[in-house]
Amino acid sequence: MLAFLQRFLAGPPTSSQNAKQRLKLLLIHDQVDLSQAQLDMMRDEILDVINRYMDIDQSGVEFRLNRSEGQVALISSVPVRRVTARAS
C-alpha cells in the first residue's frame, strides 16, 4: 500500500525510471528462468482462480517479480470489487 501511495504522489515515472525498472525486471526474469509468455500464462491462471470467487477490476491488476535479499518474490495487486462466491 505504501508503494502505491508513493507512486501516486510522485507522479508519472521518468524515462530513466522506466528503463531502470525494465532492467531490474530483465535481471529478475533471468534469475527465475521464466519467459514473459510463461509469466503471462501464470498471471492468467491465477486470475482465473481469483475470478471464481471474486469480481475483480482487470484494469488495476498488477503482477511483478521482486528480488530482495537474494530471493525472488511474486508480488501481485488485484483490486477486488466484490466477493461473488463463498467457500463452504
Image (spheres, rainbow, N blue to C red):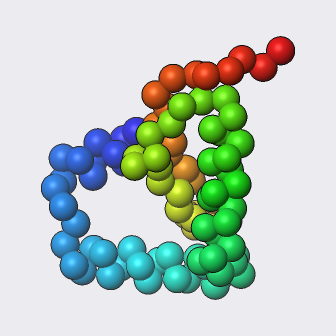
Expressed as whole percent of the image width and height from the top left, the position of residue 11 reads: 16, 56
Q: Residue 55: x and y, percent?
A: 54, 31
Observer able to see residue 69? no
Q: Nearer the viewer, residue 58 or 8?
A: 58
Task: Residue at 22% x, 79% y: name it.
Answer: 15
Q: Quadrant of residue 19?
A: bottom left
User: To which quarter of the image does residue 32 belong?
Assistant: bottom right
Q: Residue at position x 63%, y 76% from top?
A: 37
| Residue under the point 60% across and 30% down | 54
| Residue 34 is at least partly visible in this image | yes
Question: Is residue 82 rendered to the left or right of residue 52?
Answer: left
* Coordinates of residue 78 in the picture (x, y in percent): 51, 42
Q: The N terminus appears in which quarter of the rendering?
A: top left
The front one of 36 and 65 is 36
Position above or below: 43 against 35: above
Q: Is residue 79 above or below residue 36?
A: above
